[in-house]
Image (cartoon, grey):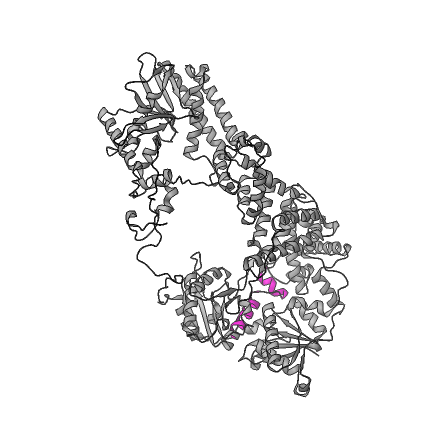
Amino acid sequence: MGVTRRFLDWQRPALASAAEWLREKYRPQAAASTQTLDLRGVIVVVPGGRAGRRLLELLVERAEAERLILFPPVIITEGGLPELLYTPQRPFASELTQGLAWAAALRKTPRAVLEKVVLHPPPSGDFSRWLELAELVRRLHTELAADGLHFGHVAQAQTGISGFHESSRWQALRQVQEEYLRTLDGLNQWDIQTARLVGIEKKEFQTDRDVVLLGTVDLNGALRQILNQVADRVTALIHAPLEWEDRFDQYGCLIPAVWKTALLAIRDEQIERVDGPADQADAVTRWMASLGGKYRSDEIVVGVPDKTLLGQLRRQLEQSGVKSRAFLGVSVGQTGPYRLLESASQFAQGRRFADLAALVRHPDLEDWLQPQLTASLTKQSSRDMNRQRRAEDILTTLDIFYNEQFAARVDPQRMEQIKNEWPAIHALVSVIDQWLCPIDHKKQRLFAWADGLRIVLKNIYGHRVLNPQNVDERILLKACEEIELQLEKLAQVPQELEPEISLKEALRLILEPLEGKFIPPPPEPEAVQLLGWLELALDDTPALAVTSVNEGFVPESHSSDAFLPNELRSQLGLLDSERRYARDAYALSVLLATRADLRLIVGHRDAENNPLIPSRLLFATDEPAACAQALRMFGKLEEVPPRKNLLSTGLQQRDTSNFHVPLPTKDFNPPTFLSVSQFKAYLACRYRYYLDHVLSLVSLSDQAAELDPAAFGSLLHDVLQHFGRTDEGERRSTRPDEIFAFLNDRLESLAAARYGKDAGRAALRFQVEQARIRLRTFAEWQARQTDEGWQIVHSEDSETQLECSFPTDDGPMKIRGRIDRIDRHQHSGIFRVLDYKTADTAKEPQQTHLQSDQWIDLQLPLYRYLVRTVEWQKGASIDGQVQLGYINLPRDQASMGCAIADWSREQLEDADKTAREVIHGITHGNFLPKTEPPPAFSEIYAAICQDNRIGKRRPLQDEEATP
């Protein structure tokens, strides 16, 4: 006796019809007096968990309506049925154990045999690549075994296909497969798929319960063979009209050849073609609005074959005031514990500074890290705290450290060297190292890695009390549970398969399986459900919109398979393009027959602007209709209403932005002194001066891969400062080699002190070499200057600043600054005040200080006042006229040299006048207007100043003050 087929009412949803069939079959009228609906002797097989849960709900509702006591059936998906029909004699190997067993089998296989499988087998010590190959072979084995095949069957099948010459490859794989099975046999474990095939061969499948197949229209070959052994207890419920019985086989599965030519009755008004993803989301909201409140939210479903549309859809629905619930939920790979393990292991393996910065920024680490740092820093003596910031400001300190040190790696020896100068950084690294101590090993066995990683996670999450009703805490809890399950699997691997592996390899075994696991969102009864394509056929809501009715999604595309191409799949009876087409053609037929309101939305472009092709299912109709459909689908896009600007509740569209540039505060304390550089900043932009020098805003980042121009210049300045202040003979030498030897020594020691031995990363080492080239050219120039009679009488002191009093109408203002260098000619007695300039291109003082005869920088003119405070020798000040200029150290060595300004007395007096105006503006709080367009090198304030904003913007002085 074969499987019994029953066709369900096509005009109703499948689950409702199935629930009614179960009630009628297992509680006939003759048993009406029992007041029970006893389905304990029934196994209902469904294609997905959601359909099973909904079927149970419908059975409960029917039982309640009839006041019956329900004994529910076993509801299970296709993959779980076989183990209900036979008793395995051995425990099944986990996927992890299977993968390791495949890796062991591959490594035992002679290399000459393996070279028939892959051209270049992995080296013996590369465990990661062996795992990759093992996973590839495991997936092939699983798919083939699910259809009752092994690798030897593929070798035999290929002989009948012209153009295929891969038999030797599959014969080699069969050798590996046999070794894999022997490996598991030696562990007294079974491969689940192979165990089923053995059970089929030995006819071990039996049951005393009825098996009901519901919506299982694409069963694999092994399951069909299992059903043959219990066929007298099996009923296939087929959701289709009886006149379609020739489209289904004896198991209620689709016959692809028949469905290939089946026609679909799609009405034109059910199809809408739009442009991009945003237009698809907009089409969904327009369709929902067109329903006119006919349905509750829980009676509406949106099908999302392309999961990349989920974010766009959810945002659009939320802005339209509609709650939604996505079918995927949150990937474990996106959760805090997963990413913490990922970040911690990356730092532990390579100790890269970038990995430390990423790890410290992990939000789950913050609550634990702050008290640890505070406790560590309280042990520092007060003399060590001169550069110390609070523990809660560690990210700022870390950025400052990076921008000064440009550390590529966090070297323990280097940390000891800087612990007095950077106590917070030293404390941070010490705390992190202590936390990661359980995984600070080169190689160890799997159970040891599992124990160490569990301790690492427990230190961060073990003290937290989580509320499963809170959405975020529920996700955290579920993520920890999934990771713990994976760690348990790691610890349970048989000792014979436990290799000594690195942390990277252990993390791969733990994290990769979790990437594809999702934490389902909590139930939201009033939300519109967003479901995947394969779930729609058994859904029973009356209103449905399906997005992305395009090739690649409906039907789903399958990427090219190097081992099992489509023609070979067809020959073997595996899932191929014909079966996918049949499955999706049937699903669309169900939707067309059972949905009161159906909208099929076809996209024209994807999110990356690539063209999309309409689904071939849309053309599965008679020839005239197919031609008309083609003209519509490939013609010009139809006009649709413009998308509305969806604003949150309470907001109204305005002609101007609600985001204002904040006005300077009126509560302002005038400065008691100004630095020379502040004058240039104020002249460039008063408002940006306010942000920089009044509010003291700074921009910090750890993204720089090399020294910026200012840091490069600072390195050269410091080397030259040492040269100018040395009492040794090099400062007065006329020999370039002697001067360069001194400069080179100082460059080496400064670079090592700041950036570590060998100057850290490659880009930094290259810049140090660039600095060395410039210093060699400078040494030659300096020797000539000394030979011409110029002597250095003053060099910048990094510890102190010069200070003078500058007269203004409002009273004197103190001006501070550092003069890089002052030279005196030993014969003429002329002084020249010089500033080192390290820009790539040499410039004259006239270019940098004046623009259209207006002063834009007052550095050199103000040095006339500062220089009077310098004693060029004990008791001797600098009076009278001095030369002002630059020493240019540009990229072009030919441009190296001194550039002296030739300003007239009148120009310098005008500079003094400009300086008094600047002082008056600053002390009186005149920080408007904001310069437009923004001055050069002001990008750090672009967001505050809205420099890149498109659209109308009022002048800053008209903005409303913001608190």
Residue 595 in magenta stretch = no
633 to the left or right of 532: left
Find the residue positioned furthest to the bottom: 30
**How many numbered callouts?**
0
> In the visual, does 256 lie left or right of 860?
right
The main secondary structure of the magenta stretch is helix
Tell me residue 598's x, y (percent).
46, 73
Does the magenta segment cover residue 567? yes
Q: Residue at x 72, y 65 (%)?
A: 197
Q: Position of residue 140 (x, y in %)?
A: 64, 58
| Quarter of the figure that contains the N terminus | bottom right
> Looking at the image, which is closer to me, 242 or 45?
45
Tell me if I can see residue 172 in this picture: no
Q: Nearer the viewer, residue 754 or 239?
A: 754
Residue 697 visible (yes or no): yes
Residue furthest to the top in view is: 827
In this picture, is 200 found above or below 900? below
Q: Would you say 900 lies left or right of 503 here? A: left
Residue 295: x %, y % from top left: 47, 75
765 horizontally vs 807: left or right: right
Q: Residue furthest left?
A: 906
Q: Position of residue 108 (x, y in %)?
A: 72, 48
The residue stretch that appears in magenta? 564-589
- Residue 371 appears in which quarter of the rendering? top right
Q: Is residue 623 above or below residue 960?
A: below
